[in-house]
Image (cartoon, rainbow, N blue to C red):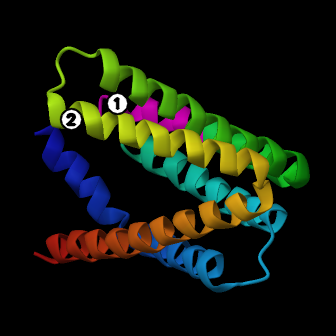
Amino acid sequence: MAKQELSSTAKQLWGLGIAFGVVSILFGILALFWPGLTVSLFILMFGIFVLVWGVIGIIVSISSTGTDKFWWLELIFSILAIGLAVYLLRNPVEAAKIWIFFVGLTFLVRGVVDILEGLFDSNRTGGNRVLAVILGGLGIVAGIITLTYPVSAGLVVIWIIGLYALLYGALLIAFSFRAKAELEK
């Protein structure tokens, strides 16, 4: 019963899904194809993107309070997203530096974890162990490059996020049209 009611709520918000999908695609196109895009400007655009995401999440969570028992998780995430967006929009240069540093640090830590798992995890077989060590090595190299050349690494990360935003927006639009078709039945 709850799934049908939640589905009904999703159907009613199909237009909002399409709008956010279009914003996501536009964001992705800007991130991918604007060659002069700097990390600071990207942080500003990402801040706006996260702000819209948070506001839409609050609307969705409040709309589904009676039908979804985990509506509060969406609400908490959305409030945190708005907080992050406010920080990003107020401090883009500092946020860009911190962001690139944490991307590099994440690569390094993940690389070390992958190598340790590859070497010492008894549940992994021979081929999986070698793959984990190789991936760990790549993670460490990516971390070193990111921390050594933060501007170039930031640009590559922008392209990856731009591609994700394009795909996410296209899927969101497709799901929204599907919800609309369900509503018209």
Along the line of sight, which residue is nearer the eye, 140 or 105?
A: 140
Q: Secondary structure at mark 2?
A: helix
Pointer 1 residue: 70
Give the class, few, some or many, for how many residues have Cα within 10 Å of label 1's Cα (few <14, many ≥20). Answer: few
Q: Nearer the viewer, mark 2 or mark 1?
A: 2
Residue 52: image x %, image y %? Answer: 62, 59
In the image, what residue occupies the spot 46% across and 65% down? 164
**Most foreground residue, 53 or 158:** 158
Residue 18 vertical placement versus 34 (above, below): above
Q: Residue at x 41, y 47 (%)?
A: 63
Quarter of the image with the C terminus is: bottom left
Q: Which residue is mark 2?
A: 128
Local secondary structure at mark 1: loop
- In primary-sequence order, the first of circles 2 and 1 is 1
Instruction: Using residue 136 as the reference point, say whether residue 50 is left or right of it.
Output: right
User: In the rendering, at what x and y percent does residue 29 appear?
Assistant: 57, 82
Confirm whether residue 66 shows in the render: no
Image coordinates of residue 65 in percent, x first then y, are 38, 36
Which quadrant holds residue 172? bottom left
Residue 2 seen anywhere in this rendered image of the structure: yes
Magenta span of residues: 65-79
